[in-house]
Amino acid sequence: MPDKDLPLRDDIRRLGRILGDTVRSQQGEAVFAIVERIRQSSIRFRRDGDETARHDLEATLNGLSPGEATQIIRAFSFFSHLANIAEDQHHIRRTRAHALAASTPREGSIAYALARSSDGGAPAEHHRPRDGSGEIAGRARSHRADARRDGGER
């Protein structure tokens, strides 16, 4: 992971530890142990292609009662939401750092696209809204932005 992403990794680890402590205190040590077993087996299987880890993961998941499955799913869902929030904050942090450093526009940004278009010889009028308002308003939103705006998942 590039150095610029270390704060993101630290944030996700910190939030994971807090969530783990919360699961342990609210749901008990047994549920926490299952979450950890699933998490560690998943990592070993994905990272190393460890077939033993895959079998352990299958056995653990297949052995869950409906109530345990609900608790485990809830824990992993909360972690996913926390990781998304950490990523959003990291994006804000990186955008702020670029702005303070007066960096050239980053690839994927509107500023970058406009600069490339201008560098390619596109006339300035191609960069203005066709309605003559002089304003560009975004309409597309990511699913996470929609969920935050609406207060829930779609």
Image: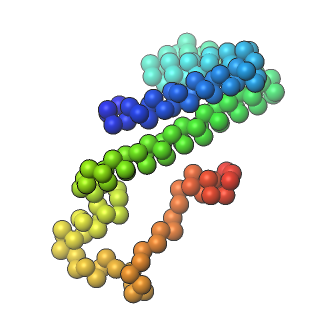
Residue 128, quarter of the rendered image:
bottom left
Position of 16 with respect to 104 (left or right) is right
Q: Is residue 67 above or below residue 5?
A: above
User: Which quarter of the figure is the C terminus placed in?
Assistant: bottom right
What residue is drawn where x is 56% and y is 15%? 53
- 128 relative position to 120: left or right: right
- Whole-percent x and y of residue 108? 34, 56
Toward which corner of the image does residue 109 lie, by quadrant?
bottom left
Quadrant assignment, res 145: bottom right
Residue 40 pos. (x, y %):
56, 18
Image quarter hosting the N terminus: top left
Q: Please state which of residues 14 and 49 is positioned toward the viewer in this rendering.
A: 14
Residue at 39% x, 87% y is 132
x and y percentages locating residue 60 in the rendered image = 68, 18
- From this viewpoint, is residue 153 visible? yes
Left or right: residue 22 versus residue 129 is right
